[in-house]
Amino acid sequence: MTLGAFSISLAVKDIHASKAFYESLGFSQFAGELDRNYLIMKNGNALIGLFQGMFENNILTFNPGWDESANTLENYDDVRAIQKQVKKAGIKLETEADENSTGPASFVIMDPDGNPVLIDQHI
């Protein structure tokens, strides 16, 4: 199973302070809108999402169909196919993608320590 680009989505208290902190570590704004309280910061292949007031916990995020520069991959595992494999493995879904749909979709699972894992396909 190929999960796609990986990033960590951080629930931040002050997006301006977080932006400045990660910029000091060599990250630059890759996507997002500061006035909408979310940014995607990039340093090489590393991606960090900064989200103020959108969710409570940090989230591990995978984007099927994308590389770390949000370029569409020619070959990738669709989120619904990944979801079927996850179900087959006996992992409980917190949210579920409609398996009869096509295009963008997502689902959430929890790792054994309670960390949310978002599989979020944008194409």
Image (cartoon, rainbow, N blue to C red):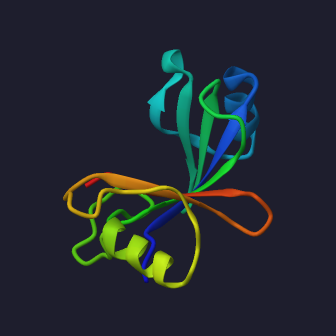
User: Between 83 and 35, which is closer to the camera in this rendering?
Assistant: 83
Which x, y percent locates residue 74? 22, 74
- Image quadrant containing the C terminus: bottom left
2 lies left or right of 58:
left
Q: How many marks?
A: 0
* Residue at image coords 25%, 78%: 75
| Quadrant of the image occupied by residue 28 | top right
Q: Position of residue 107 (x, y in %)?
A: 46, 57
101 relative position to 121: left or right:
left
Q: Is residue 53 visible?
A: yes
- The quadrant in which the N terminus is found is bottom left
The residue depicted at 48 percent of the width and 76 percent of the height is 87
83 to 70, vertically: above or below: below
Q: Residue 86, position in %: x, y?
A: 49, 76
- 43 vs 74, nearest the viewer: 74
In this rendering, is residue 86 above or below 6?
below
